[in-house]
Image (cartoon, grey):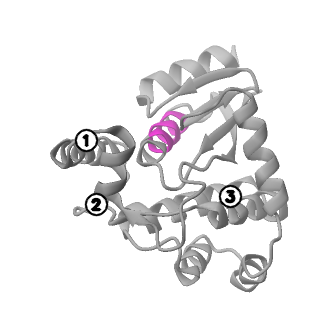
């Protein structure tokens, strides 16, 4: 009988390393198919909780946040694009233009998990990452979010009703507070069986080893 490993993937849709980390993790899970069963839930974290509507130019944002030059931003972004491509995630060649608040994305992900199920949430997570990093379009535009819902084969009319209300806002805030209270201040933070933590966009091999160790 397969052993089950539970994973809480704490991340943000606006985090490029989260896309890299998810690509690596999914590859690791695929490599271990038949040996270990893995249950993934995506938990909320906002990198830009106070970002106003309209967002901010990505180069301006990253130079201000990290105190680096525009040239360094470009080098970093190129490295991330290459890492993402290596694990099967295609980033837009010109990069994302702006940085946005992602609270509505997290409400949608909460809805997908609790009203539909974990595999639906995983499909939606990937489509929201695709919206931002592959298509490089606005997360402020509700239609772009609903298009992601449609691609994930979820109920678009239900999603629209939810987005037009404040449904799941309290639950998402509570979950964000919980993970911050655990000392999580950067993402991706991947928690295995609610007690073992791996952070960052790690390699496929790192995730494979962790899963196998925990399954033993």
For marks 3 and 2 on the same chain, the one whose residue lies earlier in the sequence: 2
Is 139 placed left or right of 114 in the picture? left
Residue placed furthest toward the left: 71
Q: How many numbered tags mark residues here?
A: 3
**Dominant secondary-structure state across the stretch colored magenta:** helix
- The residues bearing labels 2 and 1 have C-alpha atoms spaced at a distance of 11 Å
Q: Secondary structure at mark 3?
A: helix
Badge 1 local density, few (<14 within 10 Å), some, or many (20+)? few
For marks 3 and 1 on the same chain, the one whose residue lies earlier in the sequence: 1
Q: Which mark is residue 76?
A: 1
Question: x and y percent of residue 95 in the render?
Answer: 28, 60
Against 143, residue 172 (above or below) is above
Q: Can residue 186 be seen in the rendering of this structure? A: yes
Q: Secondary structure at mark 1?
A: helix
Q: Which residue is mark 2?
A: 95
Badge 2 local density, few (<14 within 10 Å), some, or many (20+)? some
What residue span does the magenta drawing correspond to?
Answer: 21-30
Against 209, residue 166 (above or below) is below
The residue at the point 54 percent across, 35 percent down is 186
The residue at the point 69 percent across, 82 percent down is 156
Q: Which residue is mark 3?
A: 121
Is 72 placed left or right of 139 in the picture? left
Question: x and y percent of residue 30 in the render?
Answer: 52, 39
Q: Can residue 90 be seen in the rendering of this structure? A: no
Badge 3 local density, few (<14 within 10 Å), some, or many (20+)? many
């Amino acid at each position: 009988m397969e052993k089950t490993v539970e994973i809480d993937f704490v991340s943000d849709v606006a985090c490029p390393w989260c896309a890299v980390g998810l690509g690596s993790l999914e590859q690791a899970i695929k490599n271990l198919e038949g040996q270990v069963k893995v249950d993934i839930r995506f938990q909320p974290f906002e990198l830009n909780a106070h970002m106003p509507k309209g967002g901010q130019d990505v180069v301006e944002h990253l130079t201000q946040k990290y105190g680096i030059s525009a040239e360094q931003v470009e080098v970093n972004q190129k490295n991330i694009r290459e890492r993402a491509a290596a694990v099967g995630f295609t980033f837009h060649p010109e990069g994302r233009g702006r940085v946005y608040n992602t609270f509505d994305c997290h409400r949608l992900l909460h809805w997908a998990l609790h009203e539909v199920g974990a595999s639906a949430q995983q499909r939606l997570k990937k489509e929201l990452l695709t919206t931002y990093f592959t298509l490089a379009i606005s997360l402020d535009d509700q239609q772009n979010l609903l298009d992601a819902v449609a691609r994930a084969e979820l109920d678009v009319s239900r999603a629209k009703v939810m987005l037009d209300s404040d449904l799941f806002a309290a639950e998402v805030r509570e979950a964000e507070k919980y993970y911050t209270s655990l000392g999580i201040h950067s993402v991706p933070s991947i928690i295995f069986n609610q007690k073992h933590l791996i952070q960052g966009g790690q390699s496929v091999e790192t995730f494979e080893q962790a899963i196998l160790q925990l399954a033993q």
